[in-house]
Amino acid sequence: MPTEILSASNVQSADSTQGGTTAFGSTSTNSGSTLADNAVTPSARWFNFAAKTRGSTSLKIKFDLTFSEFSNATLTIDYSLNNGSNWTNAFTLTSNDISSKEIVLPGDHNTTQVQLRCKIVETGGGGGFASVSFSNIRIENTYNLSRRPIIFA
C-alpha cells in the first residue's frame, strides 16, 4: 500500500503546554536535541503537520530517538489528536534507548490537529542528567488506491 509522509511546519522549544520547562538545545521541524541537568527541564513540541491527501488505512507518528539517561532522569513522549486539548502518553523512558519509534494513531484523524511533545524531568533527589536527540519526525499515512471499474460504451 502506498504511504505519504507528512512533516510538521512548526516546533516550539520550551513547550508552552508543559509549564515550567526550558528550551531544547536545538530544534527544527523534523528534529531536536538537548542536554538536561539538575534544575533544567527541557521540552519541545512539534505541530501543524501537513494535511493528508487521502483517507487512511493507517496513521503513524514515527521518529528516530537517542536517549541517554546518566542519572535520575525520565523522558516522556506524548501525542495529541485534537490540537493539544488532550494528551496521551506514548512512551516513558527511564534508561538508555536508541531506536526508531512508532505511535499508531487510533482511527482516521485530521493530521493538521496531531501534535507530538516531549520533556525530560528529574526523577531523583540528587539531580538528573540526560541527553536526547530526535530526528526524522513525521506522520506516515498509509492508504489504499481506489480501483474503479472501467465501463465501455
Image: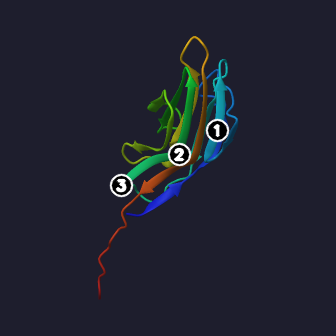
Residue 53 in sight here: no
Q: Point out the tag, 3 or 1, that comes first from the N-terminus.
A: 1
Q: Which mark is first along the chain, 1 or 2? A: 1
Q: Could you tell whether 16 is left or right of 60 in the image?
A: right
- SS at circle 1: strand
Q: Quadrant of residue 134?
A: top right
Closer to us: mark 3 or mark 1?
1
Q: Which residue is mark 3?
A: 57
Where residue 8 sits: x, y (%)? 59, 48
Q: CA distance from mark 3 to mark 1?
A: 32 Å
Which residue is outermost to the top? 125
Classify 136 as above or below 35. below
Q: CA distance from mark 3 to mark 2?
A: 23 Å
Residue extending furthest toward the bottom: 153
**Quadrant position of the C terminus in the picture:** bottom left
Q: How is the image coloured?
A: rainbow
Amino acid at the residue labelled 2 = Asp
